[in-house]
Image (cartoon, coloured by chain):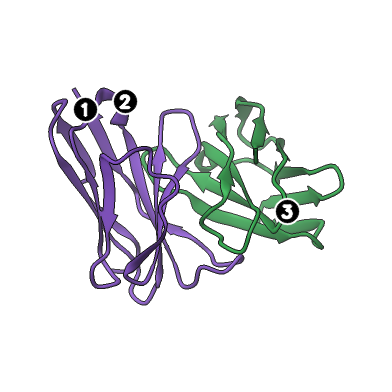
Amino acid sequence: GAGVSQTPSNKVTEKGKYVELRCDPISGHTALYWYRQSLGQGPEFLIYFQGTGAADDSGLPNDRFFAVRPEGSVSTLKIQRTERGDSAVYLCASSLSSGRTGELFFGEGSRLTVL
Amino acid sequence: KNQVEQSPQSLIILEGKNCTLQCNYTVSPFSNLRWYKQDTGRGPVSLTIMTFSENTKSNGRYTATLDADTKQSSLHITASQLSDSASYICVVSAGTNAGKSTFGDGTTLTVKP
């Protein structure tokens, strides 16, 4: 596709369940980022991939959160034992490069609601 | 700690009017500053990017200014349209990675007819 695609657009789950959120970046973009955005706040950095490897996962809040990008394209954000505080919009962005002026292209986000 | 503060938190203006949004930052070392527009339920879209040496950058009816000495930026919107209603987010990069930036909480702009 032409842009960054995220699925599902909405996910409602129960506390304690496992969730997977998928991001399909723009073709050819080597850098991929995950962010979490709570209502009324700006996106908060979670993890960054350069190719297949997680170059920086310092933003992941705890070990319940994990992300992979096995073939350097599609990425999956995985959340175990979900908690109500995990409810947020999870945004994915990709960039042609990870350099300082690399323009970020965002997907429309996956809205996660934990009941 | 790197921080980006935006004001006002929200703003309502009439169609056709101008407005200015403010961004103050304490990000160091400064690399660049971007303004994004985020429509409700959508991802942010880049409006402008400014480096240390740039004072002003325009994108249509959007004009961003940067004062690196006072660590302030503004986004001026001219002749507002209903479609300008959105959240405007200021993002400041400190290092060499554009994605590991500090995001402000945004200003929610509502343009009324």
The quadrant holding residue A52 is bottom left
**Callout 2–callout 3 Cβ contact below 8 Å:** no
Q: Which residue in the protein does label 3 denote? A: B29
Depth order, front residue of B60/B88: B88
Tell me what residue is drawn at x 37 percent, y 77 percent. Answer: A28
Q: What residue type is labelled 3?
A: Pro
Q: How crowded is mark 3: few (under 14 residues within 10 Å), some or many (20 or more)?
A: few
As measured in the structure, the alpha-carbon distance from the residue carrying label 1 to the one carrying label 2 is 8 Å
Q: Which residue in the protein does label 2 denote? A: A85
Tell me what residue is drawn at x 57 percent, y 51 percent. Answer: B101
The quadrant holding residue B21 is top right
Kindly indicate which chain is depicted in purple in the rendered structure: A
**Coordinates of residue A54 in the picture (x, y in percent):** 37, 61
Q: Which amino acid does label 1 sit on?
A: Val
Kindly indicate which chain is depicted in green in the rendered structure: B
**Coordinates of residue A84 in the picture (x, y in percent):** 26, 24
